[in-house]
Amino acid sequence: MHLLLIEDDQEAAQFLLRGLRESGYTVDHSGDGREGLFQATEGRYDLIITDRMLPHMDGLALVKFLREQGVGTPVLVLSALGTVDDRVQGLKSGGDDYLTKPFAFSELLARVEALLRRSTAPDAAPTRLKVCDLEMDLLSRRVMRGGREIDLTAREFKLLEFLLRHAGQVVTRTMLLESVWDLHFDPQTNLIDVHMSRLRQAVDRGFGKPLIHTVRGAGYVIRDEDQSA
Amino acid sequence: MKINPLRTSAFRLALGYGLIFTLGVSALLGSIYLLTKTILNDEVDAVISAELEGLVDEYRRGGLSQLGDELTFREDSWGTTGAVYLLVDRNLVKEGGNLQTWPFTGIPSERWAEFPLSARRPNDDLVRHPVRASIFLFPDGHRLLVGMDVTQERRFIATFRTATLWGIVATALIGVLAGSWLSRRLTRRVQRAAETCDAIVGGDLTRRLPVRGSQDEFDALAQAVNSMVDRLAEKTQVLRASFDSAAHDLRAPLYRLRGRLEDAARSPAADQQLRDRIDASLQELDHVQRTLSTLLQIAQAESAISVANSAAVDLGELASDMADLYEPAARDRHLALTVQTDPGCDVRGNRQLLAQVVANLIENALKYVPAGGRIELRTERVGQRSRLTIADDGPGIPESERQHVLEPFVRLPGATAIAGTGLGLSLVAAIARLHQAELKLADNGPGLKVMLDFRAA
């Protein structure tokens, strides 16, 4: 996977580059808006990560320009502003996701993975999601595990659906809060953990093999450990 | 704001002036009327007195017989001058004059008396004429009555009175009509200005009040308001730019610090002990970051002129969503979180900011209400407003402290042991102000009741 990082803060960029490369990505870097735009239009990148405030060209203007040129590469916008309308502007101008600085590297990594998965996944909307012996029917809204039906509340269903759509991938608490509740703030309580422990009770309890796993310092993942390990 | 033209100060002023003007005109016309009436009566009285004196002189000169002759001589005076005469003896029996009988029952006590006289017109119609008369008592007991037909004078006065009354009514009518026309004109101008000001308050800082160039007081006011808005727009621009750069400048070092710490933790040289210490530092950093972004959010909400990305938000739905989000956390703390919503509590606002408000209030309750307690979320329509209530049965906030706790970094004594930034309620207050919602902290007997009254969308 080939990424482009456009970030003018040299020191921060070095940490991000190292982290991303350690995670197995090939990453190019640009520290300037205009130069970054040239690279983005010429190179074949799978994902672009761009800062919002850049010398010579604003990050949002850059995304807008890319979209007008017909470049559909997913873009993750990083911003130090972090206000509500800043996020809305970021997504309106064509960004696919938005992250407020400072963020944990694990948050960035999870979002990068999610964006890459979204752009490479086949377009057809699945009607069934499956991990190991856990199966979700999106049409009848039924969840079965090992031939037994699992009763879930509407919210638990949405949570599990999000996990299954990102099966094998780490999803962060913020991602869950954003996509399941459509809320973009940082709650002080361990809200998501409480919801996840309930979901776990329903999905994993009484079955030999747990499917939902906590990833320390990052979030959660649903996967069949035997297959991935 | 809709202005009722009947309640404007312009209308009241016009009405007041109309009233004063009408009173003035009434006094003027009234005194002319009274004066005219007096002059006319005095004139009649003077004529009657002169007549009477003349006839008394005749009596003095030639006794009853000369007076009788004189009266006979004047017998047809009714048809020409409208004068009547009657001489009666002590038993009120006629002895001369052109009246047939004594017109009074008994003897009038006043010197001046009035009586109606029926007279036939040439076409045989019977007409009653008002007659004013004076009576003279001779020493021998005879009485002489001299009177004048005052039909003309009375008719004139009646007409004059009618004209006066109509004049007053017309003046009052003109006053009211002119007043309402004037007030409607003024109201329209003020209404337009008020609408523009509403739009400006609503966030459109490009709007300005119209200046007609007539140099009148409205132009002066409009120019003053416009320069105020110019200044406001300028300030807002500067403030926004400085917030943006402050946010950027404060976050950039934290961003690098976090990067450096995480990078160090990932390095293969780091042992478990170092990783744990870095983790602890990162948690500390999280707290700083959280405080900083809450502060920036408060500053932004306080300085913003309007709600960004404002849309219709169903308060009931929001309350249900938030209750759903926090319910498991509440249950973990053995607290009952319930929600009760009225339909139709739509408000205009930013859902994310309003969610932040509800979240902060619920989190406060989660922190301070002891196990076994209740937290209630409620939305309802109260008149023209939509009310969001969050009530608990925890320790509450003493009345003297309720205003104080809305200020940044204020924490109640005894609360310092509980983790928090001391900014949660300040942010709630700032977002409420931004949404032009009224925030009230009240006693829930026992516990705290926080109410937010929004203008209905």
Image (spheres, rainbow, N blue to C red):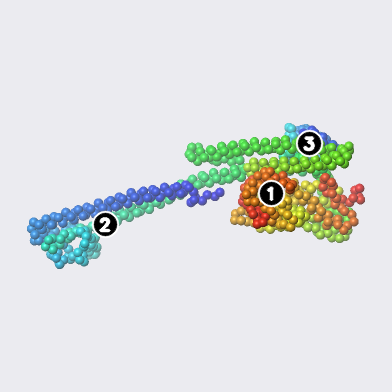
Residue at the spot of label 2 = B154
| Viewer-nearest residue: B299 or B5 | B299
Quarter of the rendering containing residue B283: top right
| Viewer-nearest residue: A17 or B425 | B425
Q: Position of residue A127 (x, y in %)?
A: 82, 54
Q: Earlier in the sequence, mark 2 or mark 3?
A: 2
Q: Earlier in the sequence, mark 1 or mark 3?
A: 3
Give the residue at x 41% y 49%. Answer: B18
Q: Amino acid at mark 2?
A: Arg
Q: Amino acid at mark 1?
A: Val
Q: Position of residue B56 (x, y in %)?
A: 13, 57
Are the residues flagged by discs 2 and 3 in contact, CB closer than 8 Å? no
Badge 3 marks a residue whose secondary structure is helix
Q: Share a chain, discs 2 and 3?
A: yes
Q: Nearer the viewer, mark 2 or mark 1?
A: 1
Residue at the spot of label 1 = B357
State the count of labels: 3
Give the residue at x 83% y 57%. Answer: A202
Residue at the spot of label 3 = B256
Cα–Cα span, label 2 and label 1? 84 Å
Q: Amino acid at mark 3?
A: Arg
Is the residue marked by circle 1 packed among few (<14), some (14-19), or many (20+) residues within 10 Å? many
Q: Position of residue B258 (x, y in %)?
A: 79, 38
Badge 1 marks a residue whose secondary structure is helix
Quarter of the rendering containing residue A144: bottom right
Quarter of the rendering containing residue B165: bottom left
Query: Callout 2: residue from which chain?
Result: B
